[in-house]
Amino acid sequence: DLHSNLNMLKELLAVLLCLMSSVADIQKTSVSTCASQGSSYYYDVPSLTCSQCTTNQIPSIDKQQCVCSANAIASYTSWTASSGPSLQCTVCTGGTFPTKVQQTCIACGTTASSTTSLNLSAAIISATCIAYGPSSVVSGVCTCPVGYILTDFNATGALANNEGKLCLLCPFNTYVDSTNPYRCMPCSDEKMRRDSTGRCSCPSGYVEDSVLAAGSSASDASLVGIHVCVDQSVVQGQSFALGSFAQQKYYDVVDAGGAITSSVVVDRSLPFAAYYVASVARCKATRHTPSCQALANLCALTLFSSDHPTCQAYQDITKTVLQSSINGFKGWYLAMPWLFYEQTTQEVLFATGINRGVALSGGNSMLNLTLTTYALNGTYLGQQAWLQLPQQT
């Protein structure tokens, strides 16, 4: 009846006010305020608070996480009951330096360590000395061996009128563009290397998320996933059935004519087919913040269905973490986005930590709502006032 509905509305409003007053101070924190605290501070996106990088670490370019300093390599500790994977940075010693992906220390080559200045032309000639003329001519079009691009220029950069078209070896972390044989394209993951077939492949100990997502249907590998390398030990023994995690069910669907269909099943929803495998694997392996957020986003798209693999995966990860009251909120797990509200209505309703007054009229009658926004792939986009968002009419 009307009386009970009004009481329910008042109770929900009270809960909302309590929640808003509790998170207001958290929302005042931003990337810029954290950076202003010092060069070692960054904005921890999962907890929406400022944190400080530790030994041999520096804030990332976007100031949203810690990365290893330029002279160190990275590793991660395993998940424990009290904490997620922790970044560990070890400085390279003995005249060695980190690789680009900061996984191994190696020495500089003899040419790079020479005190004599490098001759750029010599370097180019050195790189092309193993290159040779086009291996075949097909239908009047010059072609090159796997991993080589065509070039019209010689080692000096001049048009190769005398030599003819040449083949130049691409770097091993690139592949030849199938639509443009004159261009080397970077692999989709820095860990990948070009294999004997010319395709970018993950190194030993890693597997491409797209291969896992496609399963037995290898032809689908180019259509699913985001083509990154994930730790094989993390996904070992885990089943990724495309027909399960990529399926989405919608209820009470209204068509253009106003007719309602009780349920509609989409066998392969693009966001789920693209992001699910990589999000689960990277979140579990290294507490990769965008991946954990992407997993939470996918769960939200199912309307938090406990039966869907995305929400099940999120809850399986949070079950391994004991710290479940970040910023004082039950259900906000360490290094994970806050997705499920675990406090009861009564716990919030009778909480005494409200730090501001509200009223039905006057200056305290306006509720200032601030949203923390993310892209579907989990990228943090910042905070925005509700009133500044485009309003639907």
Image (spheres, rainbow, N blue to C red):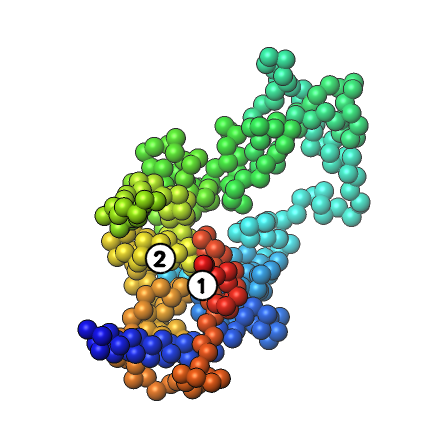
Residue 190 position within the rendered picture, expressed as x and y whole percent measured from the top left: 54, 45
Is 202 in front, or is 243? 243
* Badge 2: residue crowd in 10 Å (few <14, some 14–19, many ≥20): some
Residue 71 position within the rendered picture, expressed as x and y whole percent measured from the top left: 61, 58
Q: Residue at x 29, y 63 (%)?
A: 319
Is 353 in front, or is 316? 353
Residue 18 position within the rendered picture, expressed as x and y whole percent measured from the top left: 37, 79
**Which residue was labeled with disc 1?**
86
Specify the farthest residue to the front: 257
Q: Mark 1 belongs to which amino acid?
A: Ser
Q: Residue at x 32, y 84 (%)?
A: 351
Q: Mark 2 belongs to which amino acid?
A: Ala
Q: Residue at x 25, y 46 (%)?
A: 261
SS assignment at label 1? loop
Q: Horizontal placement of 131 versus 213: left or right? A: right
Q: Horizontal placement of 7 versus 52: left or right? A: left
Q: Residue at x 39, y 34 (%)?
A: 220
* Badge 1: residue crowd in 10 Å (few <14, some 14–19, many ≥20): some
Asked whether residue 158 is in view, the answer is yes
Find residue 170 and report its image quarter: top right
